[in-house]
């Protein structure tokens, strides 16, 4: 049934971390491995969807049948997402996007002349929120990586970013979340909650993808 619904749809999925350059040899990033986003891409592709992954730097192979666009910074991921999302049926923001970037990226390698140094940061655009503002908005799914009050913060992001669904993971719990092979999710729409219990990211992805297919049909 899910296969019939997803077949031929275009899904765009962001995955992995972003890298925010400081100078030609340094950057700020985070611990996202891309495993969760790539597992979602694989699960959606197995249902017959045409999947494009917008991927930050990861070491994973591209899942069979998926297209992949490689980016490094949040600004580049934003540009690619807004180019691809208007033609998509489903957009999933699984990437761990840096909230801030370096205000002034140095042209040359910064020298260690001072004992202290300060780097000014400016806010990055919110990719999933901007996708949700599109006139031709796809069914838009965000993630929420939280270390406390998971449900409260997730529901706040669902409403504030105008998302159709949000999948919250508790990234303070051991053995799940960033870089782990397993995950557990609490999924919220504006009216419902679904819990996906701790399992491999592949199994969690299959459950989330089938939930998305069903909710999108409503
Ligand atoms: O990659 P893995 O190692 O497998 O780990 C998976 C994961 C923990 C990274 C993943 O499950 C996850 O939670 N991804 C979202 C991480 C995150 O950035 O969460 P957030 O609560 O800070 O952001 C909320 C949502 O807004 C996310 O959908 C995020 O992609 C999106 N966002 C955030 C900032 C920004 N500038 N643009 C965005 O689109």
Image (tube, rainbow, N blue to C red):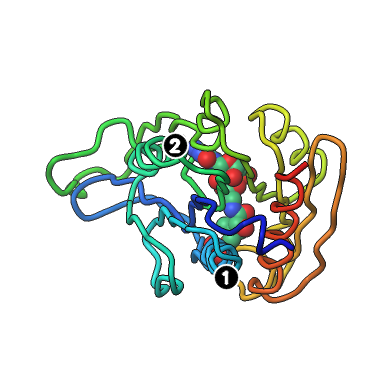
Looking at the rendered image, the quarter that the N terminus falls into is: bottom right
Q: What residue is shown at x 40% (from left), y 38% (from top)?
A: 78
Q: What element carries label 1?
A: helix
Image disc number at residue 67: none
Residue identified by numbered label 1: 46
Residue 198: x %, y % from top left: 78, 71
Looking at the rendered image, the quarter that the C terminus falls into is: top right
Q: Which of 41 and 185 is in front in this view?
A: 41
Confirm if mark 1 falls within 8 A of ligand 1.
Answer: no
Residue 59: x %, y % from top left: 39, 72
Give yes or no for contact between labels 2 and 1 (Cβ–Cβ under 8 Å). no
Taking 29 as reference, is 194 left or right? right
Q: Which of 2 and 199 is in front in this view?
A: 2
Residue identified by numbered label 2: 100
The span from disc 2 to disc 1 (Cα, nearest Å) is 35 Å
Q: Measured along the vertical axis of the image, is residue 50 above or below residue 78?
A: below
Residue positioned most to the left: 108
Q: How many marks?
A: 2
Taking 51 as reference, is 7 left or right? right
Residue 154: x %, y % from top left: 74, 41
Residue positioned most to the front: 4
Within 10 angstroms of label 2, few (less than 14), some, or many (20 or more) residues?
A: some
Among numbered discs 2 and 1, the one appearing first in the sequence: 1
Front label number (2 vs 1): 1
Within 10 angstroms of label 1, few (less than 14), some, or many (20 or more) residues?
A: some
Q: What element carries label 2?
A: strand
Q: What residue is shown at x 43% (from left), y 55% (from top)?
A: 52
Q: What residue is shown at x 40% (from left), y 66% (from top)?
A: 58
Quadrant of the rendered image containing residue 119: top left
Q: What residue is shown at x 76% (from left), y 58% (from top)?
A: 185
Residue 82: x %, y % from top left: 41, 35
Taking 201 as reference, is 193 left or right? right
């Amino acid at each position: 049934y899910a296969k019939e619904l997803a077949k031929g749809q275009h899904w765009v999925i962001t995955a992995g971390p972003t890298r925010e350059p400081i100078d030609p040899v340094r950057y700020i990033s985070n611990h996202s491995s891309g495993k969760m986003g790539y597992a979602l891409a694989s699960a959606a592709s197995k249902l017959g969807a045409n999947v494009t992954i917008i991927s930050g730097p990861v070491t994973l192979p591209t899942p069979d049948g998926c297209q992949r666009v490689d980016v490094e910074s949040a600004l580049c991921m934003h540009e690619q997402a807004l180019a691809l999302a208007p033609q998509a049926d489903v957009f999933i923001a699984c990437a761990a996007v840096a909230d801030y970037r370096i205000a002034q990226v140095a042209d040359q390698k910064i020298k260690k002349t001072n004992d202290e140094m300060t780097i000014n940061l400016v806010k990055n655009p919110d990719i999933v929120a901007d996708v949700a503002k599109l006139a031709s908005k796809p069914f838009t799914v965000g993630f929420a990586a939280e270390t406390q009050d998971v449900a409260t913060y997730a529901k706040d992001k669902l409403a504030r970013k105008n998302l159709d669904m949000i999948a919250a993971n508790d990234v303070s719990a051991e053995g799940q979340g960033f870089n782990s092979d397993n995950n557990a999710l609490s999924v919220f729409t504006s009216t419902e909650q679904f819990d996906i219990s701790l399992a491999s990211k592949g199994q969690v992805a299959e459950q989330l993808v089938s939930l998305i297919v069903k909710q999108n049909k409503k």
